[in-house]
Amino acid sequence: QVQLVESGGGSVQAGGSLILSCEATGYTYRSYCMGWFRQAPGKEREGVAVIDSDGSTRYADSVKGRFTISKDNAKNTVYLQMNSLKPEDTAMYYCAQRGWLYGCSTSASFGYWGQGTQVTVSS
């Protein structure tokens, strides 16, 4: 019922910046927790950042202070601003929406996922 489409990935050098976008459509989209996750080759998928309906945010320790999650409800879009990128940030980044109205954290279950956008950071 919910469709998520990511964009904005690419290749950058260490220290550079990228902004990822996630356009979402679906019933009661604004009421749900949204998140960004990433998965590198051979690695487990990890939660990067989440934003709740009230605008509150949480981040993985590895990206806190460098990444910022935000949303524009009028555009049905969630963003992930990534600054001071490191080679270890290289991964496929996925946008996701939680399927339950309550609770929002990187460890929560998310029911809807985008196709992903690749971020590659070179040294």
Image (cartoon, grey):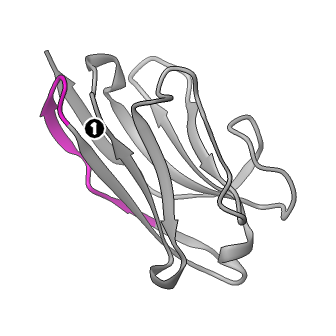
Q: Residue at 50% x, 29% y: name it.
A: 64
**Furthest residue toward right:** 102
Q: Is residue 11 above or below residue 85?
A: below
Dividing the picture into quarters, in which one does residue 48 lie? top right
Q: Quadrant of the C terminus?
A: top left
Within-10-Å neighbours for mark 1: few <14, some 14–19, many 20+: many
Q: x and y percent of residue 61 in the render?
A: 57, 22
Q: x and y percent of residue 115 in the render?
A: 43, 55
Q: Residue at 17% x, 33% y: name it.
A: 16
Dividing the picture into quarters, in which one does residue 25 lie? bottom right
- SS for callout 1: strand
Q: Quadrant of the N terminus?
A: bottom right
**Residue with the mark numbered 1:** 119
Left or right: residue 39 versus residue 92 is: right
Q: x and y percent of residue 118 in the render?
A: 29, 42
Left or right: residue 18 versus residue 21 is: left
Q: Nearer the viewer, residue 42 or 88?
A: 88
Left or right: residue 55 versus residue 13 is: right
Q: Residue at 71% x, 66% y: name it.
A: 53
> What residue type is disc 1 on?
Val
Q: Is residue 94 above or below residue 89?
A: below
Left or right: residue 62 versus residue 60 is: left
Q: Is residue 28 above or below residue 121?
A: below
Q: Residue at 15% x, 37% y: name it.
A: 11
Magenta span of residues: 5-16
